[in-house]
Amino acid sequence: MKRLTIGLPDEAFFQRKPEKGLITKAEIRALSVARLAPGVGDVIWDIGTATGSVAIEAAMVVGGEGKVFALEKNAEDAEIARQNVAKFELGHVIEVIHGRAPQALGQIKADPDAVFIGGSGGEMAEVIKTSLARLRPNGRLVINAITLDNLSAALDTLKSVGFKFDVTLVQISRSKPILDLLRFEALNPIFIISAIKSGTSPGAEEAT
């Protein structure tokens, strides 16, 4: 059994080679999972799972009583996600689905307590609307957006359906040695968008 903790090093996961970077980085992953606030026994959807890193760390919390559905449109990435799930021995908790959102979300019969959107395949509005329609009362929605286009699409969609939301801009720099000196190398800035579905009235939300 591999050591399980939140914010695992990126190197702990199998990744696509020679291309790398299709992974939610450790620092962003820790913040995003915290916003998802998974609980024991929860059902989690991870849309655009890529390596499966967010699904894996959420699965550590929900345990065997819960379930994580990890959706990925790219066949190669879906296979890498399955390899990571096997590596961390979480196959009893995580189901990796090769399919494109929002269409493939219909394959998931269990409604989610929390939804993470790491990739939308250019269909951000429909992915959000489909997810919110299935999200249970008091459920959490967390979106990671790298581009201003996806940020704008996400915010416009949440506004159009009357959801209040919270946005955090995360800018991370990691130390990197250069000869006998130390410098910092910046990662891509990430917008973390989150909202909570009201448990009292289906159309209203609360800000996180």
Image (tube, rainbow, N blue to C red):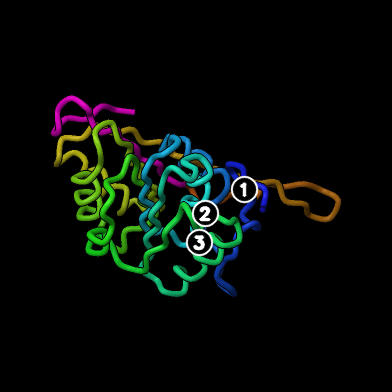
Residue 118 drawn in magenta: no
Residue occupying the point 50% across, 65% down: 82
Q: Residue 35: image x %, image y %?
A: 42, 35
Residue occupying the point 30% across, 44% down: 112
Lower position in the chain sequence, tag 1 or tag 2: 1
Q: Say which element carries label 2.
A: helix
Lower position in the chain sequence, tag 1 or tag 3: 1
Residue kind at label 1, given as amino acid type: Leu
Q: Which mark is residue 40?
A: none
Instruction: Work out which quarter of the rendered image holds the C terminus and state it.
Output: top left
Q: Residues within 10 Å of mark 2 (few under 14, many from 20)?
A: many
Q: Is residue 5 left or right of residue 22?
A: right
Query: Looking at this view, is 184 or 105 the one in front?
Result: 105
Q: Where, by quadrant of the figure, is residue 197 drawn?
A: top left
Disc 1 + disc 2, Cβ < 8 Å: yes
Tell me how far mark 1 sits from mark 3, CA to CA: 13 Å
Q: Say which element carries label 3.
A: loop
Residue occupying the point 61% across, 54% down: 10
Residue occupying the point 64% across, 56% down: 12
Q: Where, by quadrant of the figure, is residue 37 drawn?
A: top left
Q: Which residue is mark 1?
A: 8
Q: Which residue is mark 3?
A: 51
Tell me how far mark 3 sits from mark 2, CA to CA: 6 Å
Q: Residue 23: image x %, image y %?
A: 51, 58
Disc 3 + disc 2, Cβ < 8 Å: yes
Q: Which mark is residue 53?
A: 2
Residue kind at label 3, given as amino acid type: Thr
Q: Residues within 10 Å of mark 3 (few under 14, many from 20)?
A: many
Span of residues in magenta: 190-208
Query: Looking at this view, is 189 or 39 the one in front?
Result: 39
Residue kind at label 2, given as amino acid type: Ser
